[in-house]
Amino acid sequence: MKRLPNLLQAACCALACFLLSPYLDEPGEFVGGGVTRIVFQLADLAWVVFGVASVVSLLRARAGAVIAIAGCLLCSPLVLYVASRGVWGPTQVLSMLTLVATAALCLRALLLPRASGARGGARG
């Protein structure tokens, strides 16, 4: 039960990495623009960051949380850009929900005190 938050965090990172893949396959005409080129480059980097975060989250929850929050920040411009076009499909909704869930789990891992000796005593 102690490893469940780590597993959830790693699963959310892996799901975010999986959900980013369709955006990165064939962006088409959007890559040539000055702003959209940067947005897609950030999303490419976020894909790698989420892959690393899913592995690190299994070993060290807080380090994985920091890496995953960086991934959330890197890919949020692309997800918001796609959402702003007005085409809302299940993939876009699931991508946004996954980013929110990943950020919430990572903030929880960072803000809550550690279970082992963080409070200095037994509960009573």
Image (cartoon, rainbow, N blue to C red):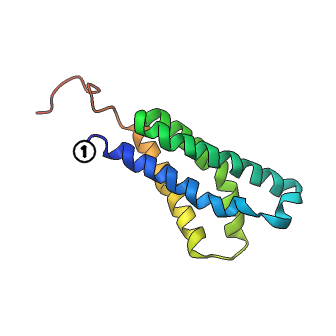
Q: Is residue 91 left or right of residue 63?
A: right
Front residue of this view, candidates 57 and 93: 57
Front residue of this view, candidates 86 and 44: 44
Q: Quadrant of residue 108?
A: top left
Q: Is residue 121 above or below residue 56?
A: above
**Which residue appears farthest toward the left when viewing the image?**
124
Q: Is residue 34 above or below residue 97?
A: above
Where does the image place residue 69, in percent across and percent down from the top left? 55, 43
Q: Residue at x 76, y 64 (%)?
A: 26
Count the marks: 1
Where does the image place residue 67, in percent across and percent down from the top left? 55, 38
**Which residue appears farthest toward the top when viewing the image?**
120
Front residue of this view, candidates 121 and 28: 28
- Dot 1, crowdedness within 10 Å: few (<14), some or many (≥20)? few
Kindly identify the amino acid type of the residue bearing the numbered disc 1.
Answer: Met
Q: Residue at x 81, y 57 (%)?
A: 36
Where does the image place residue 28, in percent across and percent down from the top left? 82, 66
Local secondary structure at mark 1: loop
Quadrant into which the N terminus falls: top left
Q: Is residue 41 left or right of residue 94?
A: right
Q: Residue at x 63, y 76 (%)?
A: 88
Q: Residue at x 83, y 63 (%)?
A: 30
Where does the image place residue 119, in percent across and percent down from the top left? 26, 27
Q: Quadrant of residue 117?
A: top left
- The residue indicated by pointer 1 is 1
Quadrant into which the C terminus falls: top left
